[in-house]
Image (cartoon, grey):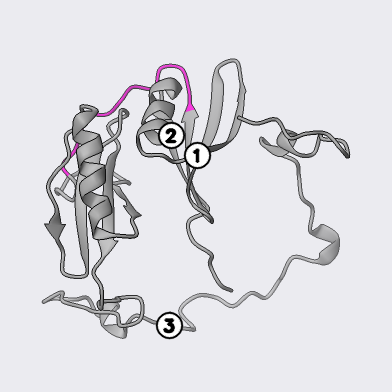
Amino acid sequence: MKYTGVNHLAMATGDMDATIRFWRDLLGMRMIAGLGEPGFRHYFFEIAPNDMIAFFEWPGVEAVSPKVHGSPVKGPFIFDHVSFGVEKSEDLWALKDKLDAAGFPCTGLRDHGFIHSIYAHDPNGIPIEFSWQVEGIDVHKNPMMADTVPSAVAKEGAEPVAGRWPEVTKPTLEKDKQIVKAAGSELYHCLKSGDEQKQP
């Protein structure tokens, strides 16, 4: 099995218009799919050819208070921040200037050794990072571990360890491989041959 990237991250908003203005118009991520009906919207923005960020809009959703990226928390918690890669170091400065000019405070560049990053928040309070991979340093090709007290599991290394989970003994039979139409299928399955795709 080979993964192709993050197909999409799914976030939530109470203000889709402000979200569109930020992600599409300020950051320049194309809005490539939109679903909706009264009381529900689900819009997708293109990060890169294989990657998207999506937002559900539900009534009553409120923006969260901005949290400092990576600062420790206690209690129930599942998400800290998301980082988007950029092609050139100069892109970080351009993004910082755009964010600051639009009223979204952005940090200066931070040198993390293998990446340089800037940090900000979107209108929903979602902590976002933009990162440029330092030339000549590729942790994908050469994984690094600098934890001074790694766990025994971490010491096993970068590669997946076989035999830690049960083997599949009852694979899904061909006759049981059903695909059920779900939200979004109406974008394409209702089109007849020759129909033009509706642009968002």
Residue labelled with disc 1: 30
- The residue at 53%/67% (across/down) is 3
Q: Is residue 64 visible?
A: yes
Name the foreground residue: 105 vs 151. 105
Name the foreground residue: 50 vs 28. 28
In which image quadrant can residue 63 be found?
A: top left
Q: Which residues are magenta?
A: 57-68
- Judge left or right: residue 170 versus residue 143: right
Residue 160 in percent (x, y) is at 43, 80
Q: Nearer the viewer, mark 2 or mark 3?
A: 2
Is the Cβ of the residue at disc 2 closer than 8 Å to that at disc 3?
no
Name the foreground residue: 189 vs 137. 137
Location of residue 110 with respect to 163 vertically, above or below: above
Three-letter amino acid code of the residue under disc 3: Val
How many numbered callouts?
A: 3
Is the Cβ of the residue at disc 3 closer than 8 Å to that at disc 1?
no
Residue labelled with disc 2: 24
Secondary structure, mark 2, is helix
Point out the image quarter for the C terminus: top right
Point out the image quarter for the N terminus: bottom right
How many C-alpha atoms fall within 10 Å of the one at disc 3: few (<14), some, or many (≥20)? few
Secondary structure, mark 1, is loop
- Judge left or right: residue 33 versus residue 106: right
Location of residue 15 with respect to 46 vertically, above or below: above
Whichever of labels 1 and 2 marks the residue nearer the N terminus, that label is 2
How many C-alpha atoms fall within 10 Å of the one at disc 1: few (<14), some, or many (≥20)? some
Main SS category, magenta section: loop
The mark found on residue 161 in the picture is 3
The residues bearing labels 2 and 3 have C-alpha atoms spaced at a distance of: 40 Å
Three-letter amino acid code of the residue under disc 1: Arg
Is the Cβ of the residue at disc 1 closer than 8 Å to that at disc 2?
yes
